[in-house]
Amino acid sequence: MQGEICLRVFLKNSLNIRMKQKKCEAGAINILQIVILKDALVKNPDTMERTARRCQELLAPFHAMLQEAQVRRVTFKLALMQTFRDGVEDYPMPAIFTFRSRNEFEEDSLFRHIEPGHAYHLDLTRLSKNFRVKSLYSMHMTTGHVHLYEATPKPSAVAKDRKASKAPRIFVRALSFVSEFTSTCFESILVDALNALDICEKNGAASGSGADNHLFINLVSDSDKVVFDPSIIEQTLDFILKRHGERVTRLGLAEVETRVVCCLSEDSPPISIRMVSSNPTGFVHVLNTYVEGMDDTGTKSVFRLIGDTKASLAGSGDSSWEGMEVNAPYPLTRPFDAQRKAAARASDTLYCYDLPALFEAAVESQWNNAAAGAGGDVTSSRPLMVMYTTELVVQKKAGVGGGNSWTMQDYLNGDLELAQMTRKAGANDVGMVAWLMVLKTVEYPEGRQLVVISNDITFKAGSFGTREDVVFKLASEYSRELRIPRLFVAANSGARIGTADGVKKVYKVAFKDPSKPENGFEYLYVEKEDFERLRNKDIIAEPVVLNGADGQAEEVYRMKDIIGSEPDLGVENLKGSGLIAGETSAAYKDIFTMTIVLGRTVGIGAYLVRLGQRTIQKTTASPIILTGYQALNKLMGCEVYSTNDQLGGPGIMYSNGISHLVASDHLRAITSAIEWLSYVPSIRGGLLPITGLGGVDVIDRTIDFVPTQGVPYDPRHLVAGREDDRGAWQSGFFDKGSFTEYLAGWAKSVIIGRARLGGIPMGVIITENRTAEAIKPADPADVTASEAVIQEAGGVWFPNSAFKTAQAINDFRVEDLPLIVFANWRGFSGGQRDMFDEVLKYGSQIVDAFVAYEQPVFVFIPPFAEIRGGAWVVLDASINASVMEMYAASGTARGGVLEANGAASVKYRAKDLLITMHRLDEKLKSLDLDLQNAEEGAKEEVQAAITKREHALLPVYEQIAVQFCELHDTPGRMKAVGVIERDVEWEHSRTFFFWRLRRKLAEFDLRKKMQQAGEVGRGVKSLTAIEASALIKQWFSETPGFSPELWDDDKVVLTWMAENHENLQQKVVDLTKECVVQEVFQMMTAGGNTAKIGIGGLVEGVSRAYAAMNTDDRANLKDMMKQIFD
């Protein structure tokens, strides 16, 4: 009590002094701080509330004097009682209560326990407009201060944003004073803030109920000139936040906002940088960097997105703060939250503008995995930026009028073009979005391009209208023009369906009996006034006379056709669907195409999946269907299906070969796509993406895994290796860890995949030697149906596995991959069911696929494997001798028309066995002699002895016959008759095929240039691939030191190509020149009109070229022509 009296006296005296000051025109400027050191308080909520009220009561009598003395803030600082923590004395920071003149000197509880000089650094005013804020507690550490507030949305704010969550959330405000900006100081205050939130009992995320929490960190330096590049700050913060990303997500932090004031150079003024990190996808944190600057009018301070930063260049951020006022209150829901929730609600998918962040994360993951396996070699080449993105936007060409809006008709008129631009997320006015991405992957650290097209499922449910079709078409054509991969991210509802709303609001019904509408109607009509407004553009109608209910006749217009002025109502959308279906089919033949199904895809969306062939499907809520289950149930009149997954989920589409891969979530699906692209050249027809083997494998090594004869085994072990029963690694044919299987759920008697041999990507086809199961599910629509489990024997092509083989070969061809087939087929299944299921058709497609192949193809018969009959026919190298070669494992591989047992039963019958017995068995020879010399009565006894002996020897000679037939099928005979190139020791086959592949790739590249040389002269026949190889062999043989005998030595040929590279290039130039010479010669000596027209065209062409030449080129041409005519 005595202390309060003293305080009142102090207030009165000090205020009397200040009241004599001259008034400040700007308003109150003085600050009064009152520090009370005695009577330390106990820090608990009740005590704090009582103390705040008592301080306010103490100031109440002095309001007028405070205003007269121009006091704008009064701060009370009261000591807190000493405490003990773990036996150690703890001296807490004082309790602080702030009272402001603008609040009539009531406590500003938002700033309780905050040092007044620090308060403005916490940006607390942005909380109070939309939330009721309650201070929870504060923590003061050596790294800075952390303050936690519980914020409950105000009713007035909820009324403006009715979809917003009304649940309280936690705002964490952290302030750190640093002498210099370092990653350590940021991480320290971040960890302190996370610790504070972690122990907060009010945090809803801790209980699993979810939260919308927010963390603000302000790093304040006492230096006036802190020079930093914002992109460096961004990269540092991004790295730290990703390291703590899992914890940030678990604590329910929707955003982490960081403020830094720095200078771009020594001479530039300080600027305020805001970096906002969020995790909108739930998989990866993205960081947007803004600068606090003035708007275009120069009247307001707003956030401006900084260009050339990681998020802006990669297109991975949503730029949602762009243009927002710096002091704008925090909203209840963040920008694009509605779209994200709509996408998740519609099909458990993502908002399309969040996809670039997943691509960036997938590439970063690839680099991380490569570094973990290969170490420093990969880390040293890793770029700071792994992705650059620009949006591909459809716009009218320059000079085309009619405003900025466009339609399908503009496309048909040729008035549209695709433009690259960087714009904010959500700026699209069409439900299809496309990007051009440059990914700096492990295989292409300098960057590879790809076009990504995605449905926007938040725009009219992701349906395909004509404008969506145009975006898809132009973006796909653009990828074909650049010959780069095209990826389609599918989440849609099929072709758009609409009705003419303008007609719907005014049409009327001519009932048969107006008094009894339940009796039916005759037609639909509109009245004359409406007809005049709707005619031609909305409806086509004819006049009729309608007798009204009052008996009076009235002229109305009976509707014959409803056209509708609204766009995209019906069949025009199907025309657009046909447009993009044809485009996708063409794109599959020209470039690498892939579809990533992240949500339901319906109708035309499903067809685009199949037409693009390669498909990755998310395992949940991503069915590929033609018609929804509700429509089918209605059609059948009963509830047959309960989900769309029964029609097109992974259980169906992965098992029937539509989906090549399945992924458990969105990020894994994108990551699988990036891994798939790692095998594919950056452009169609480009060089293969060859990777190093440092720390992963070596080229010249033996293969440890060897199958055991007669024992079934997993054929994947041949190519990928395995761990034996003791945990020791047994290496396989390909580089360790490089084999990835595709289409594993379908046609399991064949295995297909992609792998690397010495870093060179290859397509792989392997025979399954074990019995596989094919399961055909029962259709719920057929009550008599039941699930069928079909056993498929190993080493046999069935209709599905033959189709799978042909499809894989076609896929590998478009991916420009060399191919190796590990063949172990006894033939095709020719039973009635399989013949009916078109095994002959699909087997023939294997031949078609090989004929079209352009890269090297090796068909290799591995140890204890065989190729028989029709299987050999579709694998023989003569199908496409320009690219195919056959090999067999030394000693144990077999090949022939029939298996040895079958051949023996046909070609070594019983009579042949008997002849062989009597030729080889000494006892039978003796008995034959005895039979010849025996008396008539003794012959029966000798014959009986012969028969007995024959029966005893028959089992052995049957085995001899089989062995004899089998010796016709050995690699030695295959080589002797020229059906294989050579036999290869399995143990050393990896090394052999690596060098063979390298040699073939170099040879193919050279002969391709030679073939292209002939294309300049259309009258000259181009070299075939075989003729080109023969000419290369001739050049090789004519080179001193090389002979035809060395042509089969792959290392020698590669050395020759390397040493004679310039000479070979000159030979190609000479060959090109000779083709031109032959073309001109044939044209000028053809006689008749052909020669006249040709010579005239030649002279005209030379004349035009001469006019376009510079002075030196003209002089050279004159000299060459002069030499001809002189």
Image (cartoon, grey):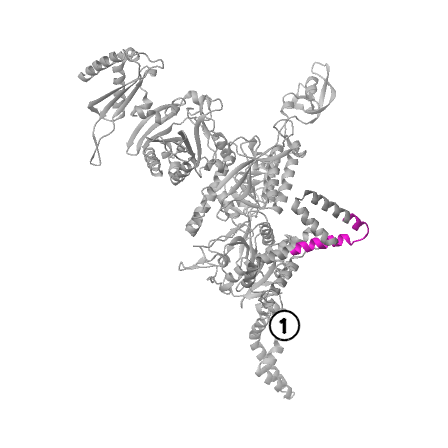
When the figure is inspected, residue 67 is found, relative to residue 584, above or below; the finding is above
Tell me which corner region of the image, top left, top right, bottom left or bottom right, holds residue 825: bottom right
- Please state, as top left, top right, bottom left or bottom right, where the N terminus lies in the image: top left
Give the total of numbered labels. 1
Magenta-drawn stretch contains 1090: yes
Please name the residue that numbered disc 1 is placed on: 909
Q: In the rendered structure, which amino acid carries the disc numbered 1?
A: Arg
- Which of the two residues, 783 or 1066, is positioned nearer the viewer here? 1066
Q: Position of residue 836 (x, y in %)?
A: 65, 53
* In-image side of 87 versus 465 (left or right): left
For this orientation, the residue located farthest to the right is 1088
| Image quarter (top left, top right, bottom left or bottom right) of the C terminus | bottom right
**In the displayed structure, would residue 997 be above or below residue 513?**
below
Residue at 25 percent across and 12 percent down: it is 17
From the viewer's perspective, is residue 622 above or below residue 1086? above
Q: Is residue 993 left or right of 374 when viewed as pictured?
A: right
Was residue 991 drawn as part of the magenta stretch in this picture? no
Q: Does residue 575 appear in the picture of this structure?
A: yes
Q: Nearer the viewer, residue 999 or 849?
A: 999
- Outermost residue on the left side: it is 2
Q: Secondary structure at mark 1?
A: loop
Viewer-proximal residue among 893 and 1072: 1072
- Region in magenta: 1070-1094
Disc 1 crowd, CA 10 A, few/some/many (<14, 14-19, 20+): few
Residue 271 percent coordinates (x, y): 41, 29
